[in-house]
Image: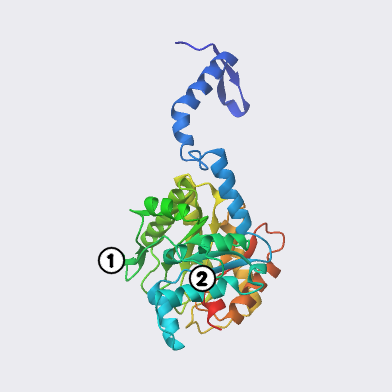
Amino acid sequence: MVLNAKMTPMKRGVTCTTTSSRALSTRCRAGSEGIGAGLRACHGGAHLSASNKAELERVASLIATPGKGITACDEGPGTIGGRFEAVGLKNSEEARRSYRQMLFETEGSNDYLCGAILDPETLYQRSTTDGALFPEKLSSLGVVPGVKPHLKIYTLPGQGGSTVMQGLDSLAMRCEEYAKAGAKFAKWRSPLVIDVAAGQPSALTIQTNMDDLARYALICQDNGLMPIVEPDISLKGCHDLETAVMVNVQVQSALYKSMLDHGVFMEGATLKPNIVNPGLDCEKSYTVEEIGKANIDVLNRCFPVAMKGANFLSGGQSLADASARLSAMNQAKGNSPWNLSFSWSAALQLP
């Protein structure tokens, strides 16, 4: 078929073909039904219904409530057992249940909490106050219940000890179960370490972990859970603050690119990053203001404005240090659009 077209001169000798409106309409319609439809299948959660998108964005907005943050109570039995042992408590399921109930139901705690990340065990435990399951109890207090769905870390062969997180194979089934149990969001952690001498994190380490986070986010959204993505760069190392900024930009840029490539609905997702810091063994010292600005620099260079906020992990910092650095970020962020708050475990529980 020959289209009714004519050659239209343009500047600098360039020509382009214009078609009749009827031919253009036919071509655009064919694109929407054919190749174009395939392109859109991996764009902005195109596979999700409007109501699913609205719910994901609603939960993301609740997590980004100004003046509130997340309590991360997702320690497994082994991790929390070590904390119990340090204060002379027996590590039992009832002890873990009672401890979580104390955290959730302390008077006034919900004035400062927007969400709680739970270990899967806690999803199915009840409050002795009224017999309600913890997700129901948290919701009644205005705290959004979430869950940790990842499993154990695995050492990535040939990458100097760098790791990936396991659990993607059965994630869809578990997300479906967790959503039925009352969870509204999930959180997946991908731990990374800066080791300049070993060349880590390498491009392979970064891309593998960020692709995993993107696929996790995609699966969560398909099952009605708002995903929190956590690229967690450890404080270990002797690197300076400038190196930390560089690596964090590389990691986060790879994360957002992978999320977009996978078709994640960015408006219905949240970031849980590490606080950008020099390594613990760095010989140079930095002011809290310098660290605050470094974190804002990273966000300004790559964090999508479609995402409503970032809830920073404490990552082994004391409550005093983590709080001071988070405060410095909020003072330095200027007109940056995101809500910047906390998602803390040890920093809230250990003092």
Q: CA distance from mark 1 to mark 2?
A: 23 Å
Q: Quadrant of the C terminus?
A: bottom right
| Residue at the outermost left position | 157
Residue 290 picture quarter: bottom right
Residue 215 vertical position relative to residue 78 in the rendered view, above or below: above
Q: Which of the two residues, 34 or 242, is positioned nearer the viewer here?
A: 34
Q: Which of the two residues, 136 or 295, is positioned nearer the viewer here?
A: 136
Considering only order in the chain, which callout, 2 or 1, is on the residue closer to the N terminus? 1
Residue 94 picture quarter: bottom left
Circle 1 SS class: loop
Residue 280 vertical position relative to residue 73 in the rendered view, above or below: below
Residue under the image location 63 percent in, 54 percent down: 61
In the image, residue 178 lies at what x, y percent? Answer: 44, 55
Circle 2 SS class: helix
Residue under the image location 53 percent in, 38 percent down: 49
Q: Residues within 10 Å of mark 2 (few under 14, many from 20)?
A: many
Q: Quadrant of the N terminus?
A: top left
In the image, residue 227 lies at what x, y percent? Answer: 50, 55
Amino acid type indicated by mark 1: Gly
Q: Residues within 10 Å of mark 1 (few under 14, many from 20)?
A: few
Pointer 1 residue: 158
Q: Which of the two residues, 164 or 157, is positioned nearer the viewer here?
A: 164
Res 240 label:
none
Pointer 2 residue: 244
Amino acid type indicated by mark 2: Ala
Name the colour scheme: rainbow
Residue under the image location 36 percent in, 72 percent down: 198
In the image, residue 260 lies at what x, y percent? Answer: 49, 47
